Image (cartoon, helix red, strand yellow):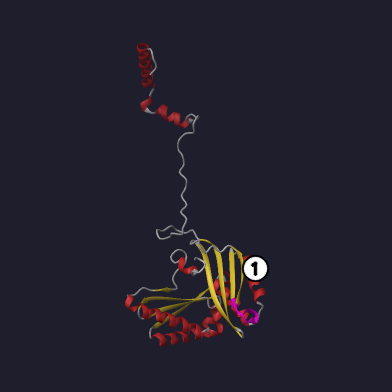
Amino acid sequence: MGQKVHPYSLRLKINKDWKSKWYFDKKLYSEILHEDFLIRRETMKFLKGIRFDISDIEIIRNNLQRVTVVIFTPRPGSVIGVKGANLEKIGQLLTKTISKKINIKIKEIKKPEFDAQIVANGIAKQLENRASYRKLLKATLLSSISKGIQGVKIKVSGRLGGAEIARSFEVKEGRIPLHTLRANIDYGFAEAHTTYGVLGVKVWLFKGEILGKQTNSDAGQVINRKPLKDKREPFGKSMSDDKSRKVLNDDRFSKEKLELGAISRNDFKKKNGSDV
């Protein structure tokens, strides 16, 4: 059932992280979770005109009265506004909504073609502008593969081309190993509101496998161990000159002791008539 599960949920703490970072008493959990929902909803409402430029909204809380909201976008200028006007308005709106201090940060996405959410947003935006879904998906697929992405899968569902019965259209290139937990798979979903109804756009991007530091919790990591070297001498080969010199220089194998050993051995052979 790996096909049905969100790629992020399987890979949390392996190569993905939570989008809301906080920990409080379980009695406050539902209240804070509802606040996170309101923060994301109100932020996207305010930025409705540029919603296709927003990749993700991350929420960080260190205490109950202070919230840090991080907005990820490839175009930070459009989010910030003239002299930071948009940031100030968003801050005031969120403070009024949840009655807490809000600190807003903007993070730029330097490679938007490697972000599945931005790719999905771009497709949805062009579908709203009445672009041909077949040509659009194939062009996006070729563009992503040419940028160095190892696998791409795009799926569009709804009343495609104004058809009376909803259906799905899918294109795929490369590998999308959803069952491999160490695989770095990015997933994005967007909606295109057309005159015929709402179209859903799903994008999967496979960026390669992550083999980082090994930890006890990383069940999806591959542990590469170096093979043990055999230090024994190969069969049929004598000791090297260096080793033989070390043996001769050792006090335990001095010339006198070796000669005494040879004499005692010969005496033993003469008495018993056999070798040792």
* Residue 274 image-quadrant placement: top left
- Image point (40%, 28%), residue name: 249
Q: Residues within 10 Å of mark 1 (few under 14, many from 20)?
A: few
The magenta stretch is: 157-166
Q: x, y (%) of residue 221?
A: 46, 58
* SS at circle 1: helix
Judging by the rendered image, the residue that carries numbered circle 1 is 142
Which residue is the extreme one toward the front?
A: 165
Residue 158: say if magenta.
yes
* Residue 100 image-quadrant placement: bottom left
In the displayed structure, 185 sits above or below 192; it is above
Rendered-image quadrant of the C terminus: top left
Q: x, y (%) of residue 144?
A: 61, 68
Residue 112 visible here: yes
- Image point (43%, 57%), residue name: 214
Q: x, y (%) of residue 86?
A: 50, 85
Q: Amino acid at mark 1?
A: Leu
In the displayed structure, 65 sits above or below 261; it is below
Q: Nearest the camera: 255 or 78? A: 78
In the displayed structure, 82 sits above or below 73; it is below
- Image point (47%, 83%), residue name: 41
Q: x, y (%) of residue 161?
A: 65, 80
* Residue 24 image-quadrant placement: bottom left
Q: Is residue 144 left or right of residue 31?
A: right
